[in-house]
Amino acid sequence: MGVIVLVEDQYENARLARRLLEAAGHVVHVAVDGEAGLTAIFDVQPDLVLMDLGLPDIDGQTVIGILRQEASMKHVPLVAFTAYPEQIAHDLGAAYGCSGVISKPIDTRRFVAQVNAFLETSHAE
């Protein structure tokens, strides 16, 4: 399947997302803040990044901005993974170059399919 970096500071959110994605065959690397996320992303070179927008150190929008400047990240889906109200999340995601948004709390019945759709889109390019 895919290699995913999940940048999420809330333990329970990260645990649930990781469990669902790994059960579907994905390899998931979790980072708990923006700095650790950047390190993991550059080390792992993932197929997809799930980025919480509200992080304790560097906000997710800034991390996405940094990643969008990197040639190696051009075709990697950067998905906002956020509990912000849906319209705000979509507006912020579009403004910062996100490939899309997955809202929290996640719908456990749809989450893996949402992630897979982003992965399929990136592989089609």
Image: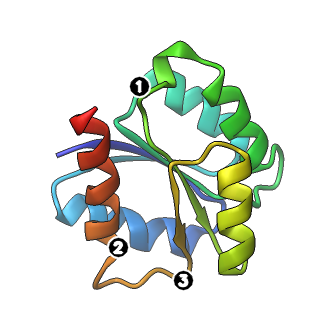
Q: Quadrant of the C terminus?
A: top left
Residue 122 falls in which quadrant of the image? top left
Say which residue label 2 marks: 111
Q: Is residue 80 above or below residue 106?
A: above
- The Cα atoms of the two marked residues, 1 and 2, are separated by 22 Å
Give the side of residue 10 with respect to residue 65, left or right: left
Residue sitting at x 41%, y 25% = 45
How many C-alpha atoms fall within 10 Å of the one at disc 2: few (<14), some, or many (≥20)? some
Q: Is residue 53 among what the camera can see?
A: no
Identify the mark nearer the N-term, 3 or 2: 3
Judging from the image, what secondary structure is the residue with disc 2 in?
helix
Residue displayed at 69% across by 48% down: 33
First in residue order: circle 1 vs circle 3:
1
Mark 1: amino acid: Gln
| Spot occupied by residue 57 in the image (x, y as percentages of width and height) | 83, 47
At which x and y percent is residue 54? 76, 61
User: Distance between the Cα atoms at labels 1 and 3?
Assistant: 27 Å
Q: Secondary structure at mark 1?
A: loop
SS of the residue under disc 3: loop
The x, y position of residue 51, in whole percent, is 59, 52
Q: Nearer the viewer, residue 65 or 8?
A: 65
The foreground one among 31 and 63 is 63
For the point 65% across and 66% down, the residue is 90
* Amino acid type, mark 3: Pro
Residue 16 against residue 23 in the figure, above or below: below
Circle on res. 59: none
Q: Is residue 100 left or right of residue 116?
A: right
Q: Which residue is mark 3?
A: 105
Q: Residue furthest top?
A: 71
Mark 2 belongs to which amino acid? Answer: Phe
Q: Which mark is residue 45?
A: 1
Residue at x 66% of width, y 39% of height = 64
